[in-house]
Image (tube, rainbow, N blue to C red):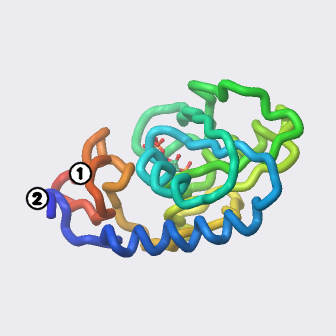
Amino acid sequence: MHKDVESVLLSEKQLEKIVNLLAKKIEKDYNGKEFIMVGLLKGSVAFMADLMKKINLDFSIDFMVASSYGSGTESSGKVKVVSDLTQPVEGKDVLIVEDIVDSGNTLNFICNYLMTKGAKDVRVVTLCDKPARRKVPFKPDYVGTEIPDEFIVGYGLDYDEKYRNLPYIGILKRSVYE
Ligand code: PRP
């Protein structure tokens, strides 16, 4: 275990199980549909890489980068698109892949953004959900697991751009960020 990690919240084995379950559900729901899988960078990178390999359907992938305005640790709620899709979404089914839903601001904004761009349907799969932190009402369509209000890192999730490469999700030691 990394020295900055207090404890493991989701082991590699547990993550694999969660990913397999989500992939099965998505495969069933999207069978016969033409869809784009959209990863929100950078947090979704490990999850999306594993998830897409388990979905035995034809689909394209793309990526977006979104960021919150303002300074400080609390997000201001105003989101902007830093890097957009490389293909049009008009009339398409879109499945957004996210590592975590926290306040809900990012996904709330991105879903509306893609709908106004003419997407036929926008759904969200998130590996982790922290419903206790919601600031705007937002319900992901597929949730890997609900997690407590702890600072988690690994499997794509960072603190100060570190720890994304850990193969598990761990709770960060408070001494690292306090
Ligand atoms: C994280 C995460 C979500 C967002 C969730 O991204 O990947 O996109 O925050 O928070 P919210 O529900 O409060 O909007 P972050 O901005 O840290 O960028 P990253 O994906 O590059 O880590």
Residue 120 visible in this rendered orientation of the protein: yes
* Left or right placement of residue 35 versus residue 2 in this view: right
* Left or right placement of residue 168 versus residue 64 in this view: left
Using the image as rendered, state which of residue 152 and residue 105 is in the foreground: 152
Using the image as rendered, state which of residue 166 and residue 9 is in the foreground: 166
Using the image as rendered, state which of residue 111 and residue 44 is in the foreground: 44
Disc 2: residue Cβ within 8 A of ligand 1's nearest atom: no
* Image height of 104 relative to 10, above or below: above
Using the image as rendered, state which of residue 22 and residue 65 is in the foreground: 22
Q: Position of residue 134 (x, y in %)?
A: 60, 62
In what element is the residue under mark 2?
loop
Q: Residue at x 31, y 71 (%)?
A: 11
Q: Position of residue 5 (x, y in %)?
A: 19, 62
Residue bearing the label numbered 1: 177
- Residue 2, picture quadrant: bottom left
Disc 2: CA contacts within 10 A as few (<14), some (14-19) or many (>=20): few
Q: Residue at x 88, y 39 (%)?
A: 91
Residue bearing the label numbered 2: 3
How far is mark 1 from mark 2, CA to CA? Answer: 14 Å
In what element is the residue under mark 1?
helix
Q: Position of residue 103 (x, y in %)?
A: 57, 55
Disc 1: CA contacts within 10 A as few (<14), some (14-19) or many (>=20): few
Residue mark closest to the camera, 1 vs 2 = 2
The amino acid type found where label 1 is placed reads Tyr
Q: Position of residue 113 (x, y in %)?
A: 76, 37
Q: Residue at x 78, y 28 (%)?
A: 88
The amino acid type found where label 2 is placed reads Lys
